[in-house]
């Protein structure tokens, strides 16, 4: 277990998978984005300016934002390099399932899930005994 900051812990398990835990505090979102970037760029050689890195960073940011905003507690992030792309899983303590709203350019805010769905190739949500798990698959361009 490697601490990435005072309020996050991460583990590297081989080359294909990494996980991190965040306390849900104000720095969690930026730390999770940094964790995703490090995994893709430093461990897997992606160009930091690539479409894949940008999409995964945005997906991680939106999912962790939702976890921090609605679950009000810790969350965990797993990132896995799969043959077709990258799989991102975020666990949080809320059992409430995310609700995708219809596109509305006049609405201020609450577009996060819309953005995630536009960027991903696969999206699943599963209730867990202590919350939920959201898994998103982003394909490599």
Image: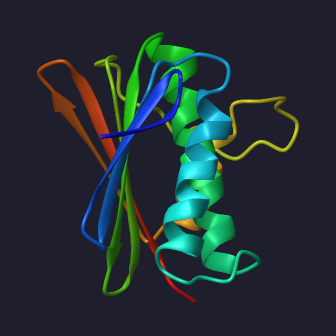
Can you name the residue that lies furthest to the left here?
129
- Picture residue at 59% right of the left edge, 82% below the top: 46
Can you name the residue that lies furthest to the right here?
106
Quadrant the C terminus occupies: bottom right
Vertical comparison of 102 with 86: above or below: above
x and y, in percent, of residue 80 in the image: 33, 65
In the picture, measured across the screen, residue 127 lies left or right of residue 124, that is left
Between 54 and 48, the residue placed more toward the observer is 48
Can you name the residue that lies furthest to the top here?
72
Visible residue check, residue 69: yes
x and y, in percent, of residue 101 in the image: 59, 38
In the picture, measured across the screen, residue 30 lies left or right of residue 22, that is right
Q: How is the image coloured?
A: rainbow
- Picture residue at 70% right of the left edge, 47% below the top: 103
> Where on the picture, by quarter, is residue 9?
top left
> Where on the picture, by quarter, is residue 127?
top left
Between 80 and 93, the residue placed more toward the observer is 80
Between 32 and 98, the residue placed more toward the observer is 32
Quadrant the N terminus occupies: top left
- Picture residue at 35% right of the left edge, 20% below the top: 96
Vertical comparison of 15 with 39: above or below: below
Visible residue check, residue 113: no
- Picture residue at 61% right of the left edge, 39% below the top: 31
Vertical comparison of 48 with 103: above or below: below
x and y, in percent, of residue 79 in the image: 38, 58
In the picture, measured across the screen, residue 133 lies left or right of residue 68, that is left
x and y, in percent, of residue 6 in the image: 53, 22
In the picture, measured across the screen, residue 86 lies left or right of residue 47, that is left
């Amino acid at each position: 277990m490697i601490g990435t900051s005072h309020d996050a812990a991460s583990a590297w398990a081989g080359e294909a998978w990494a996980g991190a835990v965040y306390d849900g505090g104000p720095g969690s979102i930026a730390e999770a984005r940094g964790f995703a970037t490090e995994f893709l760029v430093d461990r897997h050689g992606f160009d930091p300016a690539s479409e894949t890195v940008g999409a995964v960073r945005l997906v991680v940011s939106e999912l962790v934002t939702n976890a921090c905003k609605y679950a009000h507690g810790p969350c965990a992030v797993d990132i896995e390099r799969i043959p077709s792309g990258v799989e991102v899983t975020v666990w949080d303590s809320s059992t409430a399932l995310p609700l995708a709203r219809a596109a509305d350019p006049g609405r201020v805010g609450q577009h996060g899930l819309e953005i995630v769905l536009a960027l991903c190739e696969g999206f699943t949500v599963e209730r867990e005994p202590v919350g939920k798990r959201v898994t998103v698959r982003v394909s490599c361009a």
